[in-house]
Image: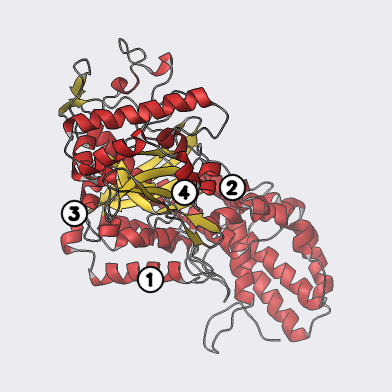
Amino acid sequence: MILQALNKYYHRKCEDRDPAQRLPAFGLEQKEIPFLLEITKAGELVQLVDTRTLNGKKMVAQIFRVPQGLKKTSGVAANLLWDTLEYVLGVDTKGKPERVAEQHAHFLARIEALSQSAHDDAGIQAVLRFLGRLDLAQLKAQPAWAQALEANAVMSFRLHGDVDLVCQRPAVVKAALNVATDADERLAMCLVTGDDAPVERLHTAIKGVWGAQSSGANIVSFNARAFESYGKTERQGENAPVGKAVAFAYTTALNYLLRKDSGQRIQVGDASTVFWADRDSEFESTAANIFGEPPKDDPDRGARAVQALFEATQSGKLGGLDDDNRFHVLGLAPNAARISVRFYHCLPLRDLAVRILQHFSDLEVVRGPNDPQFPSLFRLLASVAVQNKADNIPPNLGGAVVDAIFADASAPYPALWLNAAVGRCRAEQTVNYLRAAAIKACLNRQIRRASNISSERSNEKEFLPMLDLSNTNPSYRLGRLFSALEKIQEEASPGLNATIRDRYYGAASSTPVAVFTTLLRLKNAHLKKLSVGRAMWFEKLLGEILSSVTDFQKHLALSDQGRFALGYYHQRQDFFTKRSDNSTSTTGDN
């Protein structure tokens, strides 16, 4: 299913209206070529061209479409009409002259084999003439030679006066696309298309997955007997036969989606997540804005993307042709020498939009003026990590959260998210906006799921974004109570460096009976320091909160600790919320 969708996306991108966004045809790839050997048809060197330009502090080479490179191993394997300086010119740069000579011989042999079927192509004949009478002294006189030699740089050929490289000439492209197989090469039914085709033995490496090998890793690979099918020992790709054309298509498409400047990928914890659709859609390029961290120069980009999605859903813009336009979400994570599929979802764009909006609706909670209305996944995950560092985000958490978002509106978020959020609240004695949003979302998903299947909490209503005076849940009320007691202490002793939260929050949120009797006794001394009117208002508030609390529990379960934290946060925010004179609030006047 995944390979089929990527294969379909590849063929769509090959016909992209924007030439810069088109993917290379089968047998070709996009490659940075730092240096070009510009030659005449007679094989004479004109110049060694440096294609690099300064981008910031780094020199970036020009990208060309070239014949697909071979998968390099410890052996010798030459690419067609492009490769490193050692392969192309046979010049030793690492003190291994015998190996370099073998590399150059392989490089020359591939061109000679190509010339047999394209003997009348001027570009191929010019390259053969150039290599046949290679003049190193002339090359060393070129200004760019020293840098190319030092880096053993990748280089290719271009005829003087041409725009395209020699390897881009029709005869070479035709040879690169030639899928004729050797007599002993096996044909098998491609698992993706169902057609008989030559099987790709080694699939192109997938690059750009965070945490995987820098040289790339594979989704389809077999390198040990334990992974091989019976009777297909050491046949690698034949264990999961994928045609050469399809293998090229899905790897090219996936590498395109994972590229550095891709607008269709985000990093969610350890899961590199990419988005694409069956047909052209504006949402393809905005999905990453919705979930990704906005750039510093445009902090509102994510909020605008979510708002646009809200408006598109309400106006019916996602209907019509987009109704059956299926959207794909793929999460990949490193796993030794391979890439593991962390999650994959494929659903109509309209359903996807509904689930994304439900996610932000679950997260909605009263916030301060500087808190983001639609927090990114990165911020949400980092807020529940030790020291708020991305490196400390619990493994697999990001992928599990995304999986829940796209699975179903009532699919529960991972218990690890609630556990981590509650744990950080206790460890730091702070319930901030992002943690409160995560806790509310997790609890509401639990309640929604419980309402669909009979349980003891099936009658519990979902939490509101703001303070809910009608919520009689004991744990929620105890959180409100703790917030009220802290507020009393703050007003009685202005300028305190530490409050009861710094000393008692952890115990109050887990073992209420051990703390609240003491706190209720201490609050009497604090009330005596307040004005009579203010003290009476607080007494009335405490009475309202405790009206439905019959006893202090000995221990609160994890979900109840979340309710405690949410009650504390709601009540705390309500104390500092300005309201009109006729509004209902627990905020009193001094």
Q: Is residue 268 left or right of residue 585?
A: left
Q: Nearer the viewer, residue 104 or 206?
A: 104
Q: Which residue is mark 4?
A: 401
How far apart are labels 3 and 2 at the CA level?
36 Å
- Labels 3 & 2 near each other (Cβ < 8 A): no
Residue 585 placed where, x, y %? 57, 79
Question: Which numbered disc covers residue 386?
Answer: none
Q: Which residue is mark 1?
A: 307
How far apart are labels 3 and 4 at the CA level?
25 Å
Of the two numbered discs 3 and 4 on the same chain, state the one appearing first in sequence. Answer: 3
Of the two numbered discs 1 and 3 on the same chain, state the one appearing first in sequence. Answer: 1
The crowd level at tag 2 (other Cα within 10 Å; few <14, some 14-19, many 20+) is many
Q: Which residue is mark 3?
A: 324
Q: Secondary structure at mark 3?
A: helix
Of circles 2 and 4, the one toward us is 2
Of the two numbered discs 1 and 2 on the same chain, state the one appearing first in sequence. Answer: 1
Q: Residue at x 19, y 53 (%)?
A: 15
Q: Which amino acid is tagged 2?
A: Ile
Residue 576 placed where, x, y %? 63, 78
Q: Quadrant of residue 156?
A: top left
